[in-house]
Image (cartoon, rainbow, N blue to C red):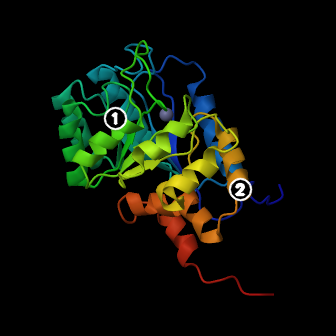
Amino acid sequence: MRDEAPLAGREPLIDAHAHFYHSASGRGDWERVNAARLRAGDRIGITYHVASVLGSYGHTSPTYFPSPADVSVGNDAMAEFALDPRIRWYVTVNPNYPDHALAEIQRGVERGAIGVKLLASRRADDPLLDPVCEAAAVHGLPILHHIWQHRTCEWPSQEISDGRDLARLADRHPRVAFILAHLGGGGDWAHTPPAIRDVPNVYPDLSGSGVDRGMLDSALRILGARRLLWACDLTMETGLAKLRALDAVGLSVAEIADIRWRNAARLFARGVFPRCERVETAPPAAVA
Ligand SMILES: [Zn+2]
């Protein structure tokens, strides 16, 4: 097979918001879906998938309100996946079970988790999240928080949060980096950048299937390239589309590198992405 250059080039690339399935997630094709993610990642040129497992994905307890048992089974599966050198992981917790959430963070850290994943289990500014954030601060773990872009009403089966809710939480926990999930994931993305502009420890990821004209431009204008993280979530093709767009919206090479991987490398603990740092510190290629 010929050595094809990755579709998004050879510069390091970190997907800060990925998911994997497992045998208890109710999908007979879970291994095939996981393999497809890694295959697509290799083709695109993803250096690291920073991923989580969301309990049983609704199979044996609700997706956004996973039972403690399902949370633990999912995290066990995720820790195994992360033995692959391309994968890093967030430990998922449900803050409605505070003792279990804290024990799970401890267990996750011992098994190599580099961040915490919070679903729509509890509104982001609820005090129940404070102990989770304090544990994240102690361990130096960024928190990836599920967000709906502009919360205008209640939605069934989830405690919905938006940029303003997350900003209030982040304001209470200035030592923690909060990754605001999927700017392109649905709702009114234009609401989010102004809502978090003045809270510097909130970093939107660009994932989600939305690729609306103007979304990246607006986020860049209001927040700047140092606040944004590239990511895919479920749809990797729109992740690739956004990389193409980043090349076309007038960013410098350094700003593109910030969004592709450097911001992630700054937020997470030092040394957790050695394959990126190797590229970064490699001497320039000799000119033939
Ligand atoms: Zn997600």
Q: Is residue 41 visible from the viewing direction of this image?
A: yes
Circle 2 residues within 10 Å: few <14, some 14–19, many ≥20: some
On the image, which quarter does residue 188 sit in?
top right
Instruction: Tell me whether circle 2 and circle 1 mark residues in contact (CB < 8 Å).
Output: no
On the image, which quarter does residue 64 sit in?
top left
Residue 223's place in the image compared with 100, above or below, is below
Residue at screen point 53% across, 65% down? 276
Give whichever of discs 2 and 1 has the lower sequence position.
2
Residue at screen point 41% across, 46% down? 196
Q: CA distance from mark 2 to mark 1?
A: 34 Å
Which residue extends farthest bottom? Answer: 287
Left or right, 82 with respect to 76, comes to right
Pair 2/1: label in front: 1
Q: Amino acid at mark 2?
A: Ala
Residue 39's place in the image compared with 139, above or below, is above
Left or right, 78 with respect to 220, comes to left
Residue 172's place in the image compared with 224, above or below, is above
Left or right, 3 with respect to 36, comes to right
Which element carries disc 1, helix, strand or loop? helix
Residue bearing the label numbered 1: 165
Percent position of residue 184, x then y: 58, 37
Percent position of residue 82, x then y: 45, 46
Which element carries disc 2, helix, strand or loop? loop
On the image, which quarter does residue 75 sit in?
top left
Residue at screen point 74% across, 57% down? 248
Q: Amino acid at mark 1?
A: Asp
* Mark drawn on residue 8: 2
**Nearest to the observer: residue 66 or residue 2:** 66
Residue at screen point 68% across, 43% down? 40
